[in-house]
Image: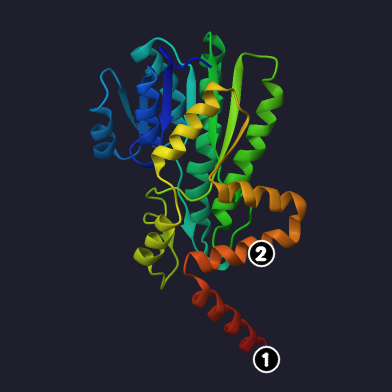
Amino acid sequence: MRIDGQVAVITGAASGIGEALAHALHAKGARLALVDVHAERLQAVADQFEGASRHVLSVADREAMAALPQQVLDAHGQVNLLINNAGVTANKPFDEHTLDDFDFVLGVNLWGVIHGCHFFLPALMEASHAHIVNVSSVFGIVGSPTQSAYCASKYAVRGLSEVLWEELDHTHVNVTVVHPAGVQTRIVAEARQAEGVDVERMARRFAKASITPESAARQIVRAIEKDKRRLMVTRDAIVMDWLRRLAPASSNRLIAKALIKALGMQKTYDARVRAYLEQRG
């Protein structure tokens, strides 16, 4: 896909991968429509790009998302590239997840992607060049403890994207699903947390094992240019993907144990196991 002169809609554009994508795509000559729920952060990002439009809304808000395509068309005259990037998580064991936690995470991570694809597809079909990028996660490939709502949403984004590969195969609208592993974003620090979690410590450990948003953005832009259907971001994501293919059940347990240790959750996890065993006698 040729990016120069195209109009790119980026959700979750106020920080992290979304902000880095704004810089990377602008450097390629794209015009930007930036979307985020955080008004001040979004304004600070939009101010860096001449002609960028700013759209403050939650991607979980169906009415707001239904109105967004026309707002972008009014501002830019066309839509060529839709990047469904906005994401949130709840870092809790399943039995501590509330249904409100599921509504929150699925509202942004899954319904946000569905809303984007549903409401923007007519405008994308009218464009001369068009591409959809749906940001899933390595947790759309691996089931990780404490991430039940997040994994449910990201597995679903993966499935939706793979359906769109086939349904849009005869059209000029290409689809890329992205599976990042660790990327230095706000998602850990801003997650809904279980009680007793040392958020600052976890965020530091996560950042240490992660790549920069700029690195992730460069890889995503290359995938768009090459019309690549599937992108694994980071070596860890590639290794996890291959392990799941080779040994679907046993590799998930192996990877989950490694993630628990890497994020500093081993003591908490061991305490839960001991409590359960003591309760069972």
The label shown at residue 254 is: 2
Q: Is residue 45 above or below residue 233?
A: above
Which percent across, then down, holds residue 146? 54, 63
The label shown at residue 281 is: 1
As drawn, is 159 to the left or to the right of 111?
right
Using the rendered view, name the quadrant where residue 12 is placed.
top left
The label shown at residue 255 is: none
CA–CA distance in space, label 2 to label 1? 27 Å
As drawn, is 168 to the left or to the right of 42?
right
Residue at x 25% of width, y 32% of height: 43
As drawn, is 108 to the left or to the right of 255?
left
The mark lying in front, picked from 2 and 1, is 2
Q: Amino acid at mark 1?
A: Gly
Residue 57, can we see it?
Answer: no
Which percent across, then down, holds residue 256? 61, 63
Which percent across, then down, holds residue 160? 64, 35
Quadrant where the C terminus sits is bottom right
